[in-house]
Structure formats: structure tokens, C-alpha cells
Amino acid sequence: MAINGYRFEMITGPMSCGKTEELLRRIRRLIIAKKKVKVISPTIDTRAKGDYIESRNGLWLDTFKVKNALEILDVVEPEDDVVAIDELQFFDSEIVNVINKLVANGKRVLGTGLELDFKGEPFGSMPVLLAYADKVDKLSAICMKCGSEYAVRTQRLIDGKPADKNSPLIMIGADETYEARCMNCYELPDEQSEKNKEKLKVLTTKK
């Protein structure tokens, strides 16, 4: 039986779209409703300097930091009504089984995460989690380049320039590393492909 209409809700979208802010808003409403909420986030997300999650508008809430998905089951207590998990894309594949187990045990689960990585590809277990969710809210952001209200991609910047598609997948950062972009402004250079083209061009010329 669903609790308050939903048992697993997902909030997704690119960087800077307000995912954590919306999660905090829902948590505060649940606290007012006298629900016991357990807030959890991965230790890999080091943007906050302590054991709390924080939105870009300054809202924050204490959280339990865990190294992997299975640790969530150790943190959640029988009296918890709601489990809120931030940055789901950073968890290992066990996160799917963990959330399904929490739901089966009658917990209401709220989750946030980037559905696409900086390459514009599905991020970690997010596609599976979105499929299991009873409710999905997909947010957009303001494009940091042209001001469009429909920024749906996360642009990685290295030294102020769009990151190459062959750079590492996980790089924890803030505004100086990632920004929201619309489809028209999103860029994903492929330096390796360009180098291969140059090599092929040289070989062809030599013939």
C-alpha cells in the first residue's frame, strides 16, 4: 500500500536545476507533518563541507553520509517513515535493490540525481531507478550561456573550456566545473577523434 500516494519519488534534471532544493522543500513539509525522515547522501559528493546537503539558495539539512548503497540499510531505522537520498547517480548498482527493499518494507523513498552525465549519456543506475519510480519530476535549468529556460544538459568545463568526451566520468565540482546548458549551447568535443582524422589525413597525403 502506497504511503501518501507514492512510495518512490524521483527528482531529476541537469546541474543547477533545483533538485536538492525541491528535495529539501518536500522534506520540510514531511517534518511539519510529523514524519520521521532519514536523509542520506554519498561520501563521494564532497561539495558540502560537513554531514549535510545544501541547495544553491542556501537551504541545508543534516544528512547521513554513506560509502555505498548497502550501508543505507544499516542507517535506516524501523521507525523512519521516509528515506530521502541525494545524488543517486553516484551510488553503485546495489542502489536499485536497496530502494526496492526499502519500498517493500513500507518506506516512502525520495531521491534526486542526474539522469545524464556530462557526455549526455544515462548516468549509472538512474535509468533503472527512473523506471521503478512511482512519480518522476524532471526539472530544467537556465542555460548559463544564452539564458534559455530549457537547459537540460550538464556542461563540464575544464579551465573554462568544454571538457573532452574522453575525460573521466566522475569529477566532483561546483559552478566552476559544471554548468547547465540548453541543447543549442551544449558542447562535447572529441579530441581523440580529431587526432585520428589528422593521422588519417597525413597517411592519405603521403600516398
Image (spheres, rainbow, N blue to C red):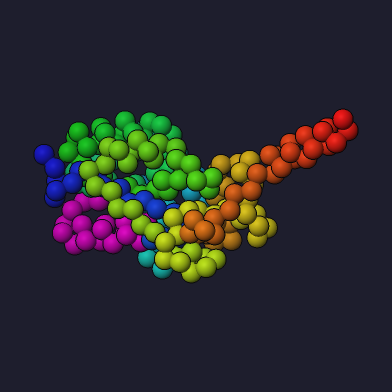
Q: Is residue 64 above or below residue 21?
A: above
What quarter of the picture does the N terminus occupy?
top left
Q: Quadrant of residue 200?
A: top right
Q: Which residues are magenta?
A: 19-37
**In this rendering, position of residue 152 left or right of residue 25:** right
Residue 113: x and y in percent read 39, 48
Q: Is residue 185 magenta?
A: no
Q: Nearer the viewer, residue 196 or 92?
A: 196
Residue at 15% in and 59% down: 33
Q: Is residue 42 above or below residue 160?
A: above
Residue at 43% in and 34% down: 92
Give the prevailing secondary structure in the magenta stretch. Answer: helix
Q: Is residue 28 magenta?
A: yes
Residue 185: x and y in percent read 54, 59
Answer yes or no: is residue 137 visible: yes
Residue 90: x and y in percent read 45, 42
Q: Is residue 187 above or below residue 198?
A: below
What quarter of the picture does the C terminus occupy?
top right
Residue 154: x and y in percent read 50, 53
